[in-house]
Amino acid sequence: MYNNLYNNLVVIGGNASGLAAASQARRINPDLNITVLESGKYISYSTCGLPYFISGYVKRAEDLLVYPKDFFEQKRNIKILMGHIVVGMDPSKKELLISVGQAQENKIIEYDKLIISSGGTNIIPDIPGIDSSNVFQFRNVSDAENLKDYIDSNNPKKAVVIGGGAIGMLLAEAFNQIGIKTTVVERKERIYDEFEYEISTILARKAEMDGVDILTKTSITSINANSGQNTATIEDASGKKDLECDLVMLATGISANTGFLTDTSIELGINGAIKVDNKLQSSHMNIYASGDCATIKNIVTGKQDYIPTANNAVKTGRIAGENAAGGNKVFNGSVGTVVDKVLDLEIASTGIGSKEAVSLGYDAIKLIDGFSSHAGSVPGAKKIAIIIIVDTTSRRLLGAQMIGGEGVGKRIDVFATAITNEMTVDDIYMLDLSYAPAISTVWDPVNKICGKAVLALDKHNR
Amino acid sequence: MYNNLYNNLVVIGGNASGLAAASQARRINPDLNITVLESGKYISYSTCGLPYFISGYVKRAEDLLVYPKDFFEQKRNIKILMGHIVVGMDPSKKELLISVGQAQENKIIEYDKLIISSGGTNIIPDIPGIDSSNVFQFRNVSDAENLKDYIDSNNPKKAVVIGGGAIGMLLAEAFNQIGIKTTVVERKERIYDEFEYEISTILARKAEMDGVDILTKTSITSINANSGQNTATIEDASGKKDLECDLVMLATGISANTGFLTDTSIELGINGAIKVDNKLQSSHMNIYASGDCATIKNIVTGKQDYIPTANNAVKTGRIAGENAAGGNKVFNGSVGTVVDKVLDLEIASTGIGSKEAVSLGYDAIKLIDGFSSHAGSVPGAKKIAIIIIVDTTSRRLLGAQMIGGEGVGKRIDVFATAITNEMTVDDIYMLDLSYAPAISTVWDPVNKICGKAVLALDKHNR
């Protein structure tokens, strides 16, 4: 079955990045035929909001849907095909091999230009019992619905979350809120391992205060539900032991969802992500890629990196869509800005960390200090901890991380903007940042930590 | 009486800017003799927090004091002389003429280097009855104490606030909160006149919803308390009328507190402010100036301007102190960032407004739109209105203003940082800003409004 259309743009993936791409292509070129292929049964949903559906803070899964299918079809003249899984492709013929729906009917779809926005896919550990019915992954609305159904029907009392990154900790928080006693099992030395030690330690302490158990330097070796037991076996330096659990959550990270490209000559990079240039073009002229399935330029390192955030997904989608439709926009890259609100703390990061700075050959120093989110004279101020990483040679800010009760989320953006502009700590120290007693301190914490860096640099370089 | 000290640094003014200057001078030079002359009976207080003392949100005036006198004298070896009013000076002799305390005893103090951080002074309208006992000004802790004493003793029911700028509106809010029916009388067309029309209109509506009356294009012609009446006479296009009031508040703006320089050759600029260069040096080699009594370089216009904010006061103080003590630091200037929290709204501005852009000869466009402070899926999001001013030629952002229920204060700082770095709206549109559903939307409002500007510019320049 062939689908022959002239000037045919096909987008693989119907979530944030793919739909940003399709929408921008439509804005640029009203005459293009645009088709979006979505493997699942939902499009345009808030991935980052899914944990709120588990905690019950968001009541209905539909509340996480951003735009309905009709919106794209009717307002933007974009055709959306649901349940269309791309299982292979032939770039030389500009053909996609599709498996449709539960019947898995095969179909070939042709394109003139292709945008791959197929997203990320969970990394599944290869351990016995991983296919048990009480083991869940958490990536999309269907995953969230399955998990919620299981919780509502089986009333689990104990959960093990494998992986102490953002998704793992957000799920631990959600479980904790609905009365499921939760243990987070983290293979590495600490949770939130991409953050500096001091920041992730503050979060770990808060988790334990809230009743979430955290086991680090611990791996999971088997899940024993298939054998009738409600346990998972874990292993640390002291040996193996069984942990009671009615529910096992996989939160062991994602890689690019690019398995269907294995037999093609499309170049892949870090984490299986499609290598793209600064116009979001892949190694093939007519194929663009955006979002969690593609590499992205790291502004600090100058290298292609893997930074699967929603903020990057929509931006790269927009540029890929524009260029696939005939535009010529350059994407400057990402500084890796992330923020989470977890366990009543805001935790945020931008730029690179101290370990990465060292590995890149910088003679970097790291500053840490604690601040008040606003003036002490106005009740309700919260503590904020800030770490910055500074290159002693250029005096440029390389990275910043923060954790605190309020005022973290958008303050990290000041650092992100400063890093994007290659600012020195001297200049950030003197940035004209807003002050009112209910909002900040006279010297904003962003100014202050950079002032501390200026003193340290003057000493270091003396 | 002479006070002869070698290597003698004298600082006029014991609030934010003067103390920042004195403290930085001490850090740079441990051997200097440093003396701070304060005209009043308090040093180091939160000027911006004073309205909270009137509303009772801050219970005691002492809670607004940031550091005690002892801290500076003992920890920093800085001599503080209270009740020392500078009434004149002779720069050729490096002498200050001082009037001390209630006895107004005269005294001469010599300096080798001088930093003038004498702050701002209220502009007092010249109208009959202005000296009545129910007329108050509001600039320092003593003013706030006088006002609070009057309110506590006299239980006023109706107040007239003259001037609808930040101080006027913050006082109107405070009066409203303690049950004093308040009318704000504003001479100009609208309150918050330095803001764009659309932003100040949102604030005016909120004020009226909250029960604060606002009379614009109205001036006050007399205060009639001396004649035994509890009225103030106001005048608008329709004529004069009397307004009942037990209390009249002056909030008609400030100018530089530099009257004592009148007979010197120290050059003054805009609003009576001491003209300084980019090292905070005045027209006299050994005299520096900082804070509300000095001009400041406006980064956007490149000109010396008058921007009396606390954030500027501490920064210019720090640089003036460093340079007066032998340093050689350059101050890059201010983008005029301000934020207030008034009537439960955050209102903020940075850069220049549309009127100023026109007067500077820019071919500028103005964009306005409304946004959600965070993702709609997470309850509690508030509305934000944003205006940006963009130069159509360079595509640079020139100014930004925001008003909303949350997430304004530190978001304006992203714009401030972008303007400082002369960013185009194209680049701000693609800035990697943080996203989590409880903190922002996937495209942050800062990105979005600039995306709108990009479209508008492409159209405008076609």
Image (spheres, coloured by chain):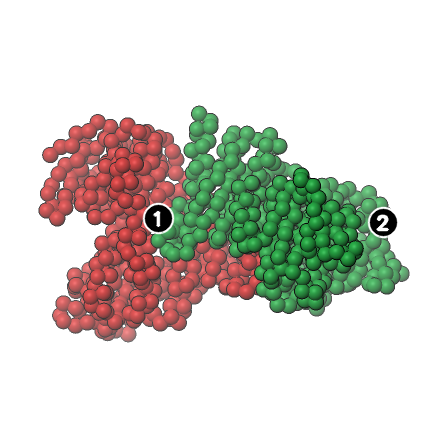
Chain colours: A red, B green
Q: Chain of mark 1?
A: A
Q: Secondary structure at mark 1?
A: helix
Crowdedness of circle 1 by 10 Å Cα count: few (<14), some, many (20+)?
Answer: many
Please state which of residues B236 and A35 is positioned toward the viewer in this rendering.
B236
Say above or below: B16 vs B203. below
On the question of residue A153 being in view, the answer is: yes
Depicted B61 relative to depicted B458: above or below: below
Quadrant of the drawing holding the C terminus of chain A: bottom right
Chain of the residue under the numbered disc 2 shown in the image: B
Tell us which disc is closer to us: 2 or 1: 1
User: Where is mark 2, residue-wise?
Assistant: B90
In the rendering, at what x and y percent does residue A10 appear?
A: 24, 36
Q: Is residue A215 found left or right of A147 in the rendered image?
A: right
Residue at screen point 26% across, 46% down? A43
The residue lying at 83 percent from left, 61 percent from top is B100
Q: CA distance from mark 2 to mark 1?
A: 64 Å
Please state if B204 lies on the left or on the right of A111 as rendered.
right
- Is residue B160 or residue B53 the one in the foreground? B160
Q: Quadrant of residue A81?
A: top left
Which residue sits furthest right?
Answer: B1
Q: Is residue A75 above or below residue B137?
A: above
Neighbour tally class for label 2: few under 14, some 14-19, many 20 plus, Cα within 10 Å: some
Q: Secondary structure at mark 2?
A: strand
Closest to the observer, B286 or A225? A225
Q: State left or right for residue A175 relative to residue A339.
A: left
Residue A58 position, x and y percent, is: 32, 58
Q: Which mark is residue A310?
A: 1
Query: Looking at the image, which residue is at 14% across and 71% down?
Result: A228
Give the residue type at disc 1.
Ala
